[in-house]
Image (cartoon, rainbow, N blue to C red):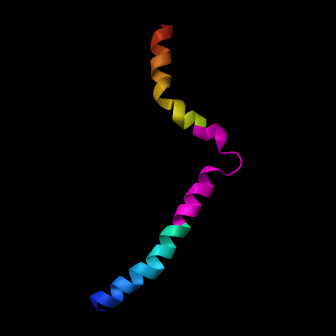
């Protein structure tokens, strides 16, 4: 496979694959029932700080 053929493949099917992956990741984030888990993940860094203040 020459460089030109590889470049054509990446420009066409590579772009399609990246677009499909992007839509999949965005859809996965906004799927039904994921809000609770995403909120827990967003606030996880503050969890240890709250426990230290309570002691």
Magenta stretch, main secondary structure class:
helix
Which of the two residues, 35 or 47, is positioned nearer the viewer here? 35
Kindly indicate the quadrant of the structure image that contains residue 28: bottom right
Query: Residue 34: x and y, percent?
Result: 65, 45
Q: Residue furthest top?
A: 55
Q: Residue at x 48, y 24 (%)?
A: 46
Q: Is residue 46 left or right of residue 2?
A: right
Instruction: Check the image and report above or below for 32 versus 1.
Output: above
Kindly indicate the quadrant of the structure image that contains residue 33: top right
Q: Residue furthest left?
A: 3
Query: Residue 13: x and y, percent?
Result: 47, 80
Q: Residue at x 49, y 16 (%)?
A: 51
Q: Which residues are magenta?
A: 21-38
Instruction: Check the image and report above or below for 7 versus 52.
Output: below
Instruction: Check the image and report above or below for 10 versus 48.
Output: below
Which of the two residues, 29 or 10, is positioned nearer the viewer here? 10
Residue 37 is inside the magenta segment: yes
Q: Residue at x 44, y 76 (%)?
A: 14
């Amino acid at each position: 496979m020459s460089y030109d053929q590889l470049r054509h493949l990446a420009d066409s099917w590579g772009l399609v694959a990246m677009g499909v992956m992007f839509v999949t990741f965005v859809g996965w984030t906004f799927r039904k029932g994921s809000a609770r888990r995403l909120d827990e993940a967003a606030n996880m860094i503050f969890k240890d700080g709250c426990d230290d203040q309570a002691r």
